[in-house]
Amino acid sequence: MGQKSMLIVDDSPLSRMMISDYVREKYPHWEVLEAVDAEDALEKSKNQTIDIMTIDYNMPGMDGIELIEKLHTLFPDAQIALFTGMIKADVKQQAEALGVTSIQKPITPEKVVKFIQS
């Protein structure tokens, strides 16, 4: 895999740090952007090329599905995962309809790497 750009969106500093650490360890040449919520993600992704995204479902303001819908129009070819503590059937269906992988928390290195390599 060559140079990639990844966006991590999660209101939990610990979750962002864990994902970021896993990615930087395995892919040290990648650019990793972190955002605390949907608004931050939309701001930080402006004028960027984003290849991969991990997005938390439960965030203040806009939820992960709403954010994915917006980001999907900006980055139609991006690989996106929706991380959530409890995957409800309707949320999973919405994610799948958008071509998004749903991943149950807790976040582990194996889950992150499996998603990136899929």
Image (cartoon, rainbow, N blue to C red):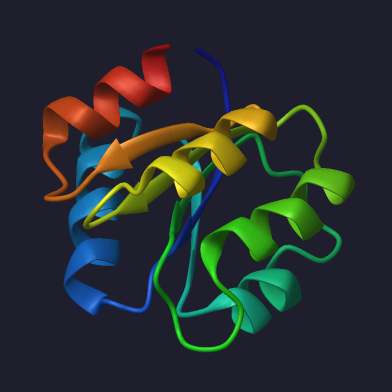
Q: Which of 2 and 83 is in front in this view?
A: 83
The residue sitting at 39% across, 71% down in the picture is: 58
Q: Which of 107 and 23 is in front in this view?
A: 107
The residue sitting at 27% across, 24% down in the picture is: 113
Q: How many labels does the image show?
A: 0
Q: Which residue lies furthest to the bottom in this view?
A: 61
Q: Nearer the viewer, residue 36 or 26?
A: 36
Q: Quadrant of residue 38?
A: bottom right
Question: Left or right: where does residue 25 sit relative to residue 96?
Answer: left
The residue sitting at 11% across, 50% down in the picture is: 106
Q: Measured from the top left, where is residue 17 in percent x and y?
A: 23, 64
Q: Measured from the top left, where is residue 115 in percent x and y?
A: 36, 24
Please determine whether, in this image, residue 86 is positioned above or below residue 4: below
Q: Quadrant of residue 45?
A: bottom right
Q: Nearer the viewer, residue 84 or 89?
A: 89
Question: Left or right: where does residue 80 sit relative to residue 21?
Answer: right
